[in-house]
Image (tube, rainbow, N blue to C red):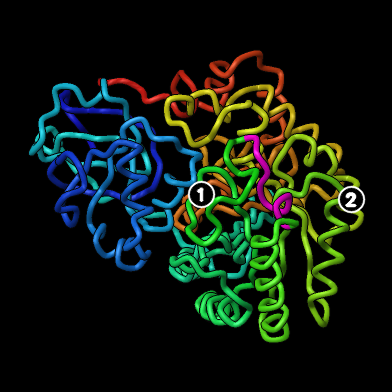
Amino acid sequence: MTIQRGIHIQGTPYVPGLVSGVLQQGSAGLGEGKLCVLSYEEIGRLVHAPQAEDEALARKLHGAGIIAVSGAPLSHVMIRLFSLGVPTIIVSNEQLQGVSVGTKLIMDGATGLITDPLQVVSTETPTEPDIPQPGTRMMTRDGAAVRLSASVSGTRGAVNAVAFGAASIGLIRSEYLLPRDDRLPDADYFESVFETLCDAAHPLALTVRLVDIAAGKSFNTLTGVPGVESTLGARGSQLYSIAPVYRVFQAQVEALGRLATRFDLSLLLPNVWGLEAYLRWRSEIERLVKGTVRIGAMAETPAAVLAIPDLARHADFMAIGCNDLMQCFFGIDRNIAELSHFLDPCAPALLRFLREAAVAAGEGISEVQLCGLLSQSPGMLPVLVGFGFRSFSVEPRMIPRLAETIRGIDTVSASALAASVCRATDSTTVRGLLGLPPGSAWAMGSNL
């Protein structure tokens, strides 16, 4: 696409997709051909509304695009937009100054560009990346196998995982499967819900992250659980000793135990902070499940990541939750939009930490699954492959684009790039090495 000078805003790419439509403020009348400017708070109300069931909300959003003003990219609220499939770009208030409601614009969620169609001189039909064969690994240019799995929140996500070529379902956010009323679900409820999801994901293997309650997630079922009020409060498996959370954990495990004889299922314990905690809850799962099921550990804090060599000797598999890891590493709440620029994937200290974690994991690093938005962040995937990571769980819609990136990676060059970014002293240098514009990963750019 060739564009003359006019409205040309470089925002932060978030959910891929190309939308041509009329700019409007707010979500009233949201739908086909509308580019809706929404604040972070408005997005939160939209996706957490009681009536906002995924299918109904996805139908309402079909054909629309969201221009998020100062969103928090790693927040639970924003990540919901991936599962809904609505193309999204993040911008600043300053970037929209002088752009009037009612203006016809084109937005590209994959590049972060918002442009005036009247300025388009010539248009080439954009080519979409090839979709991988579901259930298979991708190969780098020099023949290294890389697994691109999908992180999903429900049946719609499972369908998308198959449609976009996931190697497996690497992470099911099971807390989003809780009923919307105030009742505590039993094993029969979860068996029905999980069975529907497993059928939708056929023929993919599935990993269910057990109930993961944390600050920033809103669930009527487990409202008021003590210890969850703040970013540094308890979450995940740290809450399993509290009666109502334990009842949900128990119901999920019993339901998955019933289904494990029919489906290729694995269980993942969230926020495992050390070996003792993992062994305790593994023992409880084995008591509740009749038969064999793979039980993994998810490291989401620096302490847990450093414990991976010990955990890996007992866990059937390992995962790193990068969204929460970055929150803990930087000491910044991932759900506060105004602070999101501090959660910078290009920070050399974070990259050095991940390199040291990969070195400590040794040969097992290729099987440690990285979850979260870090591997989706522009320029990051080759660096992570250069560190030795070979397994990623990402949003389904990102898989074709990331697969295209993997096909172009040479692991020797990726290792050299990884070494270079770790020698950098600031994020600006890292972004230069990755061919990215100046500023943090979540900086909103400027009007051009």
User: What's the mark number on residue 217?
Assistant: 1
Residue 146 point in image, percent of width and height: 67, 54
Is the residue 216 above or below the residue 318 in the image? above
User: What's the mark number on residue 276?
Assistant: 2
Q: Quadrant of the N terminus?
A: top left
Drawn side of residue 192 relative to residue 83, left or right: right
| Magenta-drawn stretch contains 233 | yes
Q: Which residue type does callout 2 highlight?
A: Glu
Label 1 neighbourhood size at 10 Å, few (<14), some (14-19), many (20+)?
some
Nearest the eye: 311 or 225: 225
User: What's the mark number on residue 62?
Assistant: none
Residue 39 point in image, percent of width and height: 30, 36
Q: Which residue type does callout 1 highlight?
A: Lys
Mark earlier in primary sequence (2, 1): 1
- Give the quarter of the image for residue 229: top right
Q: Identify which residue is drawn at 49% across, 56% down.
A: 219
Local SS, label 1? loop
Residue 269 point in image, percent of width and height: 73, 58
- Number of numbered discs on residues: 2
- Give the quarter of the image for residue 318: bottom right
Is the residue 382 above or below the residue 416 in the image? below
Q: Which residues are magenta?
A: 232-240
Query: Is residue 144 among what the camera can see?
Result: no
Residue 432 point in image, percent of width and height: 53, 20
Nearest the eye: 296 or 337: 337
